[in-house]
Image: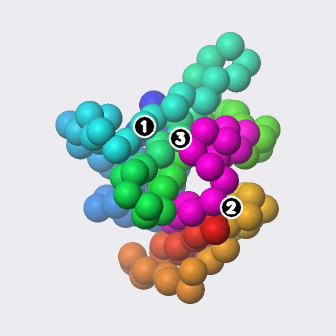
Amino acid sequence: MQTEAFRGLLEKYQDYDLSPGAEPVDKVIARFEQPWTKYFFIEAEGTDVGVIRVVDMNDGSRKRISPLWIMEEYRGKGYAQAAILAVEDLYGADNWCLDTILQEKGNCYLYEKMGYHQTGKVEHINDRMDIVFYEKD
C-alpha cells in the first residue's frame, strides 16, 4: 500500500534514498515494531484509503507525523485532514512537527490550513525536490 501510494512522487522526483515509495519492506516492518510509533489506517468508503503514522517519544519533544498517505483515487476528499484532526485529538493539538516536499503545493496547503507553520528549514534533496519542515505549537 505504501509503495503504491508514493509511486507517483517517486517517479516525479527520482528520490530513491528518502522516498517511502522506495523503502524496503523490512524497514517498514521495523518502524511498526518501534514502541514510540503508532500507525493508524484511514478507513473510508468501506476500505483502507491511507495511513498516518505518529511518532511520540513521550519525553516532551514534538510529536511527529511521518508518513501520511492517501491512495491516489481517494485524494482531495478530506481524508488526510480528518486523519490529522483525529491524531491531534488523541495526542493533543499542539507540539507537533512534520516535513513534506516543498514542490507539492497541495501538501503544503493542507498542513498550513491545519495550523502548521514552516520553520524556515529547507533541505535540498536533488534538482527536482526540497524538503520543507513544519511545526505546530
Q: Give the labeled residue for mark 3.
A: 52
Q: Earlier in the sequence, mark 1 or mark 2?
A: 1
Query: Which amino acid type is shown beneath numbered disc 2?
Result: Tyr
Towards the viewer: 28 or 65: 65
Q: Quadrant of residue 127?
A: bottom left
Q: Quadrant of the C terminus?
A: bottom right
Q: Element type at marker 2? A: helix
- Where is residue 16 drawn, in percent x and y? 31, 59
Viewer-nearest of discs 1 and 3 = 1
- Numbered range of the magenta stretch: 82-102
**Do tag 1 and tag 2 residues touch (Cβ < 8 Å)?**
no
**Front position in the image: 128 or 96:** 96
125 within the magenta span: no
Residue that mark 2 sits on: 111
Q: Which residue is mark 1?
A: 38
Q: In the rendered view, tell whether residue 97 sits above or below residue 70.
A: below
Give the mark nearer the N terminus: 2 vs 3: 3
Q: Which mark is residue 12?
A: none
* Amino acid type assigned to the residue bearing label 3 in the image: Ile
Quadrant of the snapshot with the N terminus: top left
Q: Amino acid at mark 1?
A: Lys
Residue nearest the viewer, comparing 90 with 23: 90
State the residue lying farthest toward the bottom.
Answer: 120
Residue 133, position as x, y percentages in the image: 52, 73
Q: Position of residue 50 (x, y in %)?
A: 57, 33
- Name which quarter of the figure residue 119 lies in: bottom right
